Structures are given as structure tokens and as C-alpha cells.
Image (cartoon, rainbow, N blue to C red):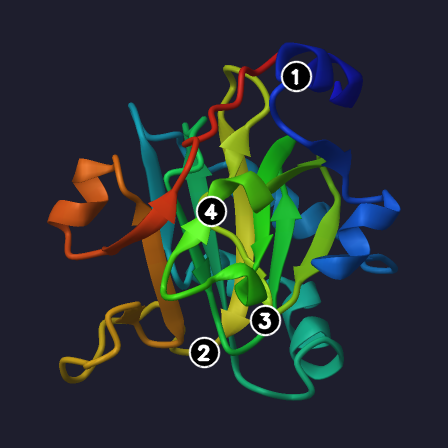
Amino acid sequence: MLEKLKKLNPNVPFYSVNDDEFKLYGRVVSGYDLHEIITEAGKIAMPENGSAYELSTPQFEKCDICEKLKNEAFGEMDIQVGFCWGYNDMLNGLEYHKSSEINIAVEPMVLFLGLVTDIENDEYDSKNIKAFYLEKGEMVEVYATTLHFCPCQASDNGFRSVVILPKGTNAPLDKPSTDKMLFRKNKWLLCHNNNEALIQRGVYSGIFGENFKITGV
């Protein structure tokens, strides 16, 4: 599927998470049994359109893998095991956390990734973005220094991604912040300057250049 995506999207720098290019942004996490949590994720109905996100999914957090990831991947910090799923084919925005994020691909999907260090004067040029393909069943850690956002679908079937973060991440802020990028707890977010939907939600408009779109297989 990756080679087909590359041919369909010649304007997008496309890689696999198993390529050396990914090492700057994260790492592939192996050695865990993902069958239980992928099965649970597959039971959740797709939205009619667009994408959905919940920061904590109770049936996921009962899976055996969660305690192992809490202890081994997050150093015994409390975690939340949530879900991002639906339909998306655009870059649209980028976020970062002051912590790593783990993603499990329940369906083949694409992550647009960048570097926090490429934000200059509160702006990010999308020419620096790269796209990384994940096969179904691949799990990756995305580093705190990596810009990321809603996954993109690799086909018309949409995408499903289990999202594991320190507990409380992405919850509403307790009070307004003077930091224009701080959008939720432990979530700094900027959107593309032509994405009116996010701008109207109060997201800081800081991405310029092409708003890349993925043509799926």
C-alpha cells in the first residue's frame, strides 16, 4: 500500500515508520500483544463523516496491554487510553505535548509529522512536513518534540487509532492561558491559515504553505 500511496501523492514526502527518516520523530514499539485492544477498537462504529476523538475509552483501559504500557512506556505515570477515528485526508493542523504519545494503527493510516524546532516566530512552514505510513497493527511512540495531529486515512475505509497519553492530556484548561498555542491541557495546537473551522474554534492560525491532502488507495 505504501508504494501506491507514494505514486498517488508525488507532492508529499512519504515514508514508512520503519524507515530511518522516522527516527527523528519517534520509534516503532514492538513486543506487545495488540490483539485484544485492536479487537475492541474494531467494534466501535465509524462516524457518519469527519473524525472523532475521546481521550479515555473505558473498554480499552481494561485491556491487559494498558498496565504494561503504563509501567514500561510511561515509567509508571498514570495514562489515558483513548481513540481517534473517522475520516480525514488533510494536514489541517499540528499539535505537540510535553510528553510522548503512543499510537496503535487499528487500520492502515498516515501521520503527518514535523518538528517543534521548525516553529519560528510562532509560525510553521508546511514545506517541512513529512508523511509516515503505518500498517494495521503497528504501534509507535511519537516524541514530545514531534508535531502531529489527526491521522489521515490510507483508503476510503477511514482510519482508527488508539491514542495513549499521560492522564489529563487534551482535557479542557482550568483557566484561560496567555499562551496562544495552549489549547487544552498538555496540548499546544496551531492550525493551517486556511482552515476556518479550527480558527473559529479558537485555534491559533500558525501554519502556512500547502495544506497537504492525502489521496488514498
Q: Which residue is mark 3?
A: 144
Would residue 62 be visible to someone looking at this image?
A: no
Which badge, 1 or 2, is on the more N-terminal residue? Answer: 1
Q: Is residue 36 above or below residue 65?
A: above
Which badge, 4 or 1, is on the more N-terminal residue? Answer: 1
Residue 70 lies in quadrant: bottom right
Front of the two marks 4 and 1: 4
**Spatial CA span between label 3 and label 4:** 19 Å
Question: Dot 3: within a 10 Å radius of its alpha carbon, few (fewer than 14), some, or many (20 or more) residues?
Answer: some
Does residue 74 appear to the left or right of 213 in the view shown?
right
Name the one closer to the observer, 55 or 40: 55
The C terminus lies in which quarter of the figure?
top right
**Spatial CA span between label 3 and label 1:** 29 Å
Residue at 71% from the left image edge and 55% from the top image edge: 140
> Marks 2 and 1: in contact by CB < 8 Å?
no
Q: Is residue 177 above or below residue 151?
A: below
Q: Which residue is mark 1?
A: 10
Residue at 19% from the left image edge and 81% from the top image edge: 178
Front of the two marks 1 and 2: 1
Front of the two marks 3 and 4: 4
Q: Which residue is mark 2?
A: 167
Name the element at disc 2: loop
Q: Which residue is mark 4?
A: 125
The residue lying furthest to the front in this view is: 121
Residue 101, image x, y percentages: 58, 65
**Spatial CA span between label 4 and label 1:** 19 Å
Front of the two marks 2 and 4: 4
Front of the two marks 3 and 2: 3
